[in-house]
Amino acid sequence: DVCVPLSRLAELISRSKQELDASPLVCTVIAHAGDGNFHTLILFDPNQEEQRREAERLNHFMVHTALSMEGLLSDPLGIVRGLPYSLRNMYGRTWCRNWENEGT
């Protein structure tokens, strides 16, 4: 899930929808118009390397796009595979090292 200021939500949905529609994977879009929160469902077979890479590419695209629009990752627990990557982009490497070491 990513979240952007409401003034940027339509642009984020539009840009993301273009990427999702161009993908060979089955994808859907869900957005909360009142809070700027944006969800996608990307269906893929994790045993198929090409599909897994495409799903990760789409995820990274949406995270980068949201971050470039003064947005953020709004539900990091929902995308565990992208969590370290996304947090690094949101908060920087030093914050992530501290966060990762907190549990050890």
Image (spheres, rainbow, N blue to C red):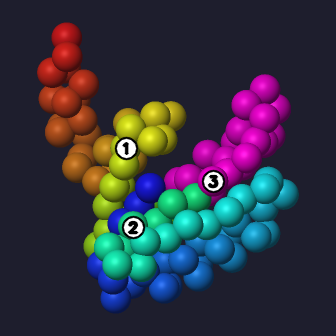
Which quarter shows the N terminus? bottom left
Residue 56 falls within the magenta-colored stretch: yes
The structure residue drawn at horizontal position 49% and vertical position 70%, both measured from the top left corner, is: 31
Sequence-first tag of 3 and 1: 3
Q: What element carries label 3?
A: strand
| Magenta part, dominant SS | helix
Which structural element holds mark 1? helix
Who is closer to the viewer here, 4 or 91?
4
In the rendered structure, which segment of residues is drawn in magenta?
41-60
Q: Check the image and report above or below for 94 versus 58.
A: above
Instruction: Identify the mark at residue 76; answer none if there is no mark.
Output: 1
- The numbered mark at residue 37 is 2
Kind of residue at disc 3: Leu
Of label 1 and label 2, which has the lower sequence position?
2
Does residue 49 appear to the left or right of 87 in the view shown?
right
The residue that disc 3 covers is 41
Across and down, in percent, residue 36 comes to 36, 74
